[in-house]
């Protein structure tokens, strides 16, 4: 069995500060109270507070200016897609917006892959599709399915599509266990995904777009049902 991680006081404070920022208790654009007052309010030392600040600065939620103070960044204006996993952990409703982007980007990737993919890409896609059918449990099916989509992105020849695909998958990792619905049956998962690979490897861009759109909408419906 895998050992459970142990939370430190810095972990707890980081989580609390992040929730207070994302919920608006510390509004975007405003400065946090002085460190001594904030540390007293949370019942921690200033050293612990500084460690938590460092993590949130790295995450893109805070910015610290020497001699001025620590300000809450406006993440909706200045943030990037790397914030999505954190935002999903805070509010699962972000998943609905992620899925909307997943549909449009995923269908476009399949279309581009159909026109740009090489024989090597086609061979890789067929092997990875077989991996969906051969997977033994829902987790393995889900991960095998992800690899097919990564391969579709690579087949476009555009590395930005690859990064977008990675970003979208990483975005819903915090709730992945609740999104296993489409992957509980390897045969059904393979049957849903196969038309996308077939259209891409046949070079039919219009059919690939349509097949991907159908696949993405159907799996989205099942996954959102799992989220309740």
Image (cartoon, rainbow, N blue to C red):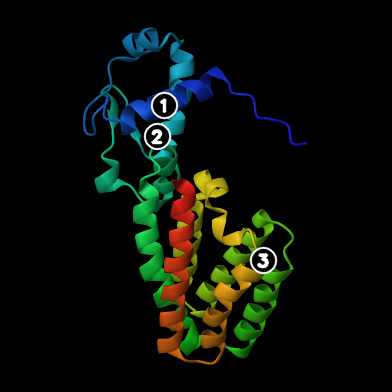
Q: According to the image, label 3 marks what residue?
A: 186
Tell me if residue 163 can be seen.
Answer: no
Q: Which of disc 3 and disc 2 is earlier in sequence? A: 2
Q: In percent of the image, x 48 and y 64: which residue is there? A: 219
**Closer mark to the observer between disc 2 and disc 3:** 3
Q: Residues within 10 Å of mark 2 (few under 14, many from 20)?
A: some
Q: Which mark is residue 53?
A: 1
Seen in the image, is 73 located left or right of residue 221? left
Tell me if residue 123 can be seen.
Answer: yes
Seen in the image, is 76 located left or right of residue 87? left
Q: According to the image, label 2 marks what residue?
A: 57
Mark 2 in CB contact with mark 1 (< 8 angstroms) = yes
Label 1 SS: helix
Seen in the image, is 24 located left or right of residue 136? left
In this view, the residue in front, 61 or 195, is 195
Q: Position of residue 96 (x, y in %)?
A: 36, 53
Q: In percent of the image, x 57 and y 47: which residue is there? A: 177
Label 3 SS: helix
Q: Which of disc 3 and disc 1 is earlier in sequence? A: 1
Label 2 SS: helix
Q: In percent of the image, x 65 and y 75: which residue is there? A: 129
Mark 2 in CB contact with mark 3 (< 8 angstroms) = no
Q: In percent of the image, x 48 and y 15: which residue is there? A: 47
């Amino acid at each position: 069995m895998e050992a459970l991680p142990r939370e430190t006081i810095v972990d707890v404070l980081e989580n609390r500060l992040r929730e207070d920022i994302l919920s608006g208790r510390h509004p975007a654009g405003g400065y946090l109270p002085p460190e001594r007052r904030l540390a007293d309010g949370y019942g921690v030392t200033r050293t612990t507070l500084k460690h938590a600040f460092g993590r949130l600065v790295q995450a893109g939620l805070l910015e610290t200016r020497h001699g001025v103070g620590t300000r809450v960044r406006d993440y909706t204006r200045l943030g990037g897609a790397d914030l999505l996993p954190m935002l999903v952990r805070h509010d699962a409703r972000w998943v609905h917006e992620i899925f909307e982007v997943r549909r449009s980007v995923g269908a476009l990737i399949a279309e581009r892959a159909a026109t740009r993919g090489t024989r090597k890409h086609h061979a890789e896609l067929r092997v990875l599709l077989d991996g969906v059918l051969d997977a033994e449990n829902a987790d393995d099916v889900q991960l095998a399915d992800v690899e097919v989509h990564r391969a579709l992105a690579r087949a476009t020849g555009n590395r930005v599509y690859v990064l977008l695909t990675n970003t979208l998958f990483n975005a819903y990792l915090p709730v992945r266990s609740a999104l296993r619905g489409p992957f509980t049956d390897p045969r059904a998962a393979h049957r849903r995904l196969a038309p996308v690979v077939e259209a891409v490897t046949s070079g039919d861009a219009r059919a690939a777009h349509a097949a991907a759109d159908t696949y993405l909408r159907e799996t989205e419906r099942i996954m959102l049902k799992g989220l309740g």
